[in-house]
Amino acid sequence: MPSVTRSWDKLSDHNPLIGFVDACLRGPAQVVLQNNPLTGLLVLVAIAWGAFENGQPRILGGAVLGLVVGTATAVALRVDEPSLRKGLFGFSPLLTGIAVPTFLDDRPLMWLYLVLGAVATTVVTLALNAIFKTWGLTAFTMPFVLTTWVLLLAAYQFDRFTVLTNLKPMFPGEGQLTDGRFTWDLVPTFLRGVSQVYLINSWVTGLIILVALLVNSRWSALFAVIGTVGATLLALWFGADATSLDKGLFGFNAVLTAIAVGAVLHRPGALVTVYTLFGIALTLFVQMSLTSMLTPLAIPVLTAPFNIATWLLLLPKRHFAPVPNHERAKETVVSAVKHSV
């Protein structure tokens, strides 16, 4: 396997087309803060499975289109080569490409809307990273969040689109949480918490994503499990919405926080694990508060809770066991962004 990886890397370095494909493959992996084309390929397989399982193959098409358009936009804007090659301009457009066909009805104009959204996501990535660089942070997936919020809110004003978020606008505190009951089928629920990182409701997709993480980092896979289990059980304990629980909707933001804080930005250890567990709870509470705030607008929170909670956890600069820059330079979103923009 190492020889195959070296051969692929060498080919990517000398062939611009293969280099572009390599950058695109790393994009899906960078959503979960991994820099590995095989991880990215497995993530695309996971997305494909979930898309067809749910009878929405257009989601796979949207993911690939968003990924390619976002990366091509970065090439056109002449971003720095190292960041481009690590897939850092593909992961947020990929998520935008999944969100648009997920939340808007399928019609020809939707695809134009998606392309414009993917281009915008890359531009927003450059803008936000320039801002957050001041505090030694990265925008993570916030470009996807902001762009998708704008696209969905704008779509309410266009007759050509129908928003399919299945959310009913109401003031916080109105109505019942749910009419459903939690099934207590915990393992599939935990796995769906992983799959929902990519807006997909499928335990098989979640399992494939965990395998994809294992390919690059066993610690990232472990903390992904800790994130989805911890947040789901805490939400269950506090009496969160049963239908949302069953779909894994309270686990996916915590999955990202756990990977970032527990496995990528710090060297795994006892204190880091405790801090990560606190971060999982913080992410859940941020998600609940944002849900209350966004309910009147009938738009989803997406991965905003992960971004906000992780920024709050990093800003105090309590680096209990920081990973040296030379060790993480090839592995993380953060290290590359600090040398770009």
Image (cartoon, rainbow, N blue to C red):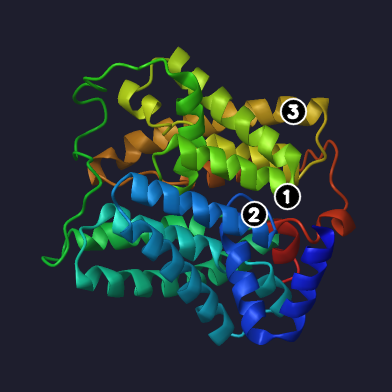
- Between the residue at mark 3 and the residue at mark 2, the CA separation in whole angstroms equals 24 Å
Task: Say which of 246 and 205 sits in front.
Answer: 205
Task: Where is residue 292? Give x, y as percent.
Answer: 33, 34
The residue at the point 13 percent across, 67 percent down is: 160
Quadrant location, the C terminus: bottom right
Numbered badge on residue 39: 2
Left or right: residue 82 versus residue 269 is left
Residue type at mark 1: give it. Asn
- Between the residue at mark 1 and the residue at mark 2, the CA separation in whole angstroms equals 7 Å
Residue type at mark 2: give it. Thr
Vertical position of residue 203 compared to residue 157: above or below:
above
Residue of label 3: 273
State the image quarter where residue 282 is shown: top right
Left or right: residue 177 versus residue 137 is left
Question: Which one is in front in this view, the residue at disc 3 or the one at disc 2?
Answer: 2
Q: Quick one: label 3 or label 2, which is nearer the N terminus?
A: 2
Left or right: residue 206 versus residue 137 is left
